[in-house]
Image (cartoon, coloured by chain):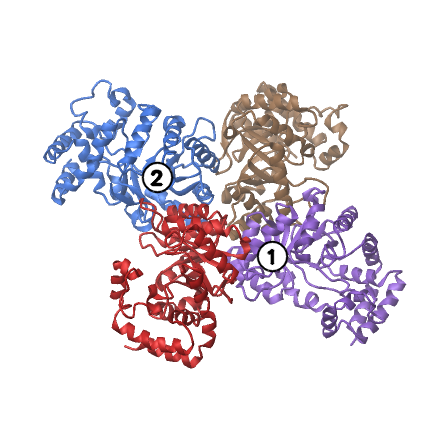
Chain colours: A red, B blue, C brown, D purple
Amino acid sequence: MNYRKVGKWGLKISELSLGSWLTFGNQLDIAGAKEIVRESFKNGINFFDTAEAYANGMAESMLGEVLKEFRRSDIVVSTKIFWGGNGPNDKGLSRKHLLEGTWASLKRLQLDYVDIVYCHRPDPETPIEETVLAMDYIVRNGLALYWGTSEWSAEQLEAAHKACKELNCIPPIVEQPQYNMLVRKRVEEEYKPIYEKYGMGLTIWSPLASGILTGKYNNGIPENSRLARFPHLRKHLEENGLLGEKVFKKLQKLQKIADELDAKMSQLAIAWCLLNDNVSSVILGVSSKEQLHENLKAIEIKEKITEDLEKQIREILEEE
Amino acid sequence: MNYRKVGKWGLKISELSLGSWLTFGNQLDIAGAKEIVRESFKNGINFFDTAEAYANGMAESMLGEVLKEFRRSDIVVSTKIFWGGNGPNDKGLSRKHLLEGTWASLKRLQLDYVDIVYCHRPDPETPIEETVLAMDYIVRNGLALYWGTSEWSAEQLEAAHKACKELNCIPPIVEQPQYNMLVRKRVEEEYKPIYEKYGMGLTIWSPLASGILTGKYNNGIPENSRLARFPHLRKHLEENGLLGEKVFKKLQKLQKIADELDAKMSQLAIAWCLLNDNVSSVILGVSSKEQLHENLKAIEIKEKITEDLEKQIREILEEE
Amino acid sequence: MNYRKVGKWGLKISELSLGSWLTFGNQLDIAGAKEIVRESFKNGINFFDTAEAYANGMAESMLGEVLKEFRRSDIVVSTKIFWGGNGPNDKGLSRKHLLEGTWASLKRLQLDYVDIVYCHRPDPETPIEETVLAMDYIVRNGLALYWGTSEWSAEQLEAAHKACKELNCIPPIVEQPQYNMLVRKRVEEEYKPIYEKYGMGLTIWSPLASGILTGKYNNGIPENSRLARFPHLRKHLEENGLLGEKVFKKLQKLQKIADELDAKMSQLAIAWCLLNDNVSSVILGVSSKEQLHENLKAIEIKEKITEDLEKQIREILEEE
Amino acid sequence: MNYRKVGKWGLKISELSLGSWLTFGNQLDIAGAKEIVRESFKNGINFFDTAEAYANGMAESMLGEVLKEFRRSDIVVSTKIFWGGNGPNDKGLSRKHLLEGTWASLKRLQLDYVDIVYCHRPDPETPIEETVLAMDYIVRNGLALYWGTSEWSAEQLEAAHKACKELNCIPPIVEQPQYNMLVRKRVEEEYKPIYEKYGMGLTIWSPLASGILTGKYNNGIPENSRLARFPHLRKHLEENGLLGEKVFKKLQKLQKIADELDAKMSQLAIAWCLLNDNVSSVILGVSSKEQLHENLKAIEIKEKITEDLEKQIREILEEE
């Protein structure tokens, strides 16, 4: 396993990492979650990502239960605060919810501190100075060692860094955006000045684009598959051009490259994310040890992707 | 129940809220106080306001006793520090009294932190930098999430924000002024630049002007009524033009509008406060469940007040 | 008892206060110390001053033992750090000694915090930024509510305030200088800009000039008196012009004024200190209840000193 | 024993001090370590230096075990963070390792705080603002009273002080470089502006240049000696010109001076370090009481070195 710096900062995380979204507390019970975490750690994964929103806090509780088995400094644990419940102050990036949410997350995780607290989304209803001062409180009081953002625009990140400077607050070091072969613009274009000016790193989610990049939807939506079960997600993907003929055509071409590399399409997709130097870690969502090992092989596949091959892939992705 | 932001800030409070002034520890014993708080919460009220001065701390003790029943993040609790006793350092906004007062209030409230600590009055005897640094201590040490002021002039608020900026202190987010149909100048005129420049919100007290806006004094001071029992208050109201023929004339005209809306005069008065967008919450002082429900109906009445009707009311209030 | 603000600041202390220098742990055992403290408090004294150096910490231990009887917010307790022992780091205003000294003092005093920690002397061997940052740590961590200095020059105070501004540190609010009819220059002249620019208050020591202002040395040094027992002190006083014919001549004239006021010379001397508005409190060193009551009468004497009489006294003091 | 200020700062340490590198947990078991520490303290040494890296934390554990016998304020304890293990985040000056490393060191040392935490090496992979903010956290949360650096270049120190100023962080007060008769450039030339601008002190290590300055290698590498056992070290010394004919020639001349002073060559070497006023303390690595006493005599030898003799030594050292 390779460990990458989070942007310019000193924290080091495994280039593949384990998320708990949609798996912990859903597909995985506590026994299954423990098994996956242990197997991940055994294979060099040191970064474990969760959120207060995942399975209504259950994902944190399950993760906390198994993390006790490791030496604290051997792991990097993150959680994300934004959706903590249905009450008027359970949502967003107010000082009240950020502090109460973090306190509650730490309790569920059975930890004194997490390594990173992410602001899970931007909150246009809360002034950036309130959010920045609350995150500063969290870091300066030892509830977290670092803080980050998730799905913030470059403009919002600029505003955050500006407020940090003005208020003498500790700035965010990492963004957690969606990034994959089909969703590239923000990471590859919009964030460019952010990398240069602030040295922020990226921990990216959805490397398989909700499973589309496994190729399993190329021939229609199989019964019982995620897209069959969540029509809302399907609609969202269609509207954003992630489903449909144009995409499947690209996927068929990519499949050929995967075949040449003796790789599964999903492995190629993950490997491709790792080619981006601004990516500190690709967060995997796996529901079995087999799937974990399958995904881990992406590291080897990445080594096989020549510059020429990378160019070919890029051209396929950019076809109209 | 609607929840409003406290000015531009991320904290959200119910537009009607429960105060404990003159009721907790006076008209209400612990059983009565518990009943009112539970009923308020059940009806969507999430903001509970008290002060060290109310019933010599007894109001806080009673409130604390019942607040234990709720999830901490579901409620927004505030207290106010200024009058804590008769000793030389029990009063005002010195660092000594602000810290000792807050520590004592938290103990009575059985809480680790309140959401808001208000400076209950301005203290011209203490330099603003001392007060601002002490409030900053309170927020940065987690004794309160936010701080506010009560009955400060716009000029005093300007001075506070200026000192916060100079000393890198966290600024106040909310003022608690008196506001009602008969006392409008400060909220509607004096504070204008404060809303714009600092985004402060308002939690307003005395929406019924010591009961005058219920109309019960229109035909003289009834025996055993509050004004009969407190001649000092009566004199104060008279001197400030809140009692007397001029006022009663207006009230008679307003009563007609209330009748048209199928509302009690008190409901119209509360509803009218809610029309002001700078008001985050109207603090109610109620001594029975019946009165609480009567007041809560103001929300429906507010919906019925057309722009035209609002204009009519304003004209009545501005008659000489 | 009158309570005065400490300079421009919000803290209020009794204009006469109780010191523990030379009495607690020397002339007074624990029973005696308790009696004096209780009697002082009963008579309105709320300010109790001590130091780590007094009786090698014993003064603090004795004071702590009796202070437990009072409500914490009713009293203002100060200690002073500088001479804590004989080790290389037991002396002066280094961060190490200031923090270790304060921790040790609080333990002896059995308090969570004192109201004021004084830097007992200036320390030219430690840079002012180190001292200022350490005092800021003490205040921002709640070990003291305020900090002050003792026997610093105006120039040193200027340097401290400048460093506080540059390093965003909380500034000192009070100086503790010697001040009495015979030692007036620093308080009356040197500190003038300090009062104006920084609003510092004064808690003054030695109002009786080591007993000289009781008049008991006018006719020579009595056996067993303090000056007889401490020849070093005697020499020091002589060198500074506090003993000798010139002084005794003045004292004889002042005695006449005292007689006119029906006061003891010592009462006149204390009363005279109280005439200075920059003095927040006159620290008394008493070894018996009788002496305490005698000194307390200075407050009444002060009321009798007309402007004209004050002028007469001043002229006597300024005679060559 | 003389105590010197650490640069311009208020902390005072013995000019000879006890290190635990290569001895504690290696040549010395717990009984031996205790004996050496007690004997050092008895002879006036108050400064005890260790590091998380020494004997994999064992040096700290052993030191902690014996330090319990002393009054905390009588001793000055330092540790150094950089190499804490083999995990991805166990090394360097990231916030994660600095905090986790310091917490672990304090546990092993059984202390609430150390006097100084050193950044054991510069870390070019971590931005200076991250390191400086983490060290500021350590000092402002009372884990250490001061912080320092070890083997940083003047340029790196400049960058650290600049970042401290910009971020309102407490600056480092001390560097721990190698310094001895054979390695002089950094301390005597490179750091000059650092002393003047920032008043940093030095606690220097390797005063005997890995034993070369004892003269024991003058006639070849004895069996079982340190250089025989560590060929890597030998190579390193040779490459840096610390071994070889040129050096031995100088040593023979210096031996003559030592003889004249009735001193051992090692005593002369230590004494010579003490001549440098920028050196606050020379850290000794001793494995027996005898060696300790032998080294302590360097203080007397230093007194015998006249200005003329110092000049002679300097000329020998500067011979090509």
Q: Is any atom of residue B205 visible in this view?
A: no
Question: In the rendered view, does B20 fall on the left or right side of C318?
Answer: left
Identified at 43% across, 27% down, the residue is B85
Q: Nearer the viewer, residue C24 or A118?
A: A118
- Left of A240 or right of it: where is B309? left
Q: In which quadrant will I find the C terminus of chain C?
A: top right
Q: Nearer the viewer, residue A312 or D81?
A: A312
For the point 77% across and 60% down, the residue is D275
Percent position of residue D168, x then y: 51, 55
Question: What chain does badge 2 belong to?
Answer: B
Q: Nearer the viewer, mark 2 or mark 1?
A: 2
Could you give the CA–CA distance between mark 2 and mark 1, rounded to whole angstroms? 45 Å
* Residue at the bottom extreme of this rendering: A308
Q: Chain of mark 1?
A: D
Q: Amino acid at mark 2?
A: Ile
At mark 2, the secondary structure is loop
Q: Position of residue A241 (x, y in %)?
A: 27, 68
Dot 1: within a 10 Å radius of its alpha carbon, few (fewer than 14), some, or many (20 or more) residues? many
Residue sitting at x 53%, y 43%: C141
Disc ID at residue B75: 2
Q: Quadrant of residue C264?
A: top right
Q: Which residue is mark 1?
A: D172
C65 and D26: which one is in front? D26
Residue type, mark 1 in image = Pro
Determine whether, in the image, residue D83 is placed left or right of residue A60.
Answer: right
**Residues tagged 2 and 1 counted as in contact (Cβ below 8 A):** no
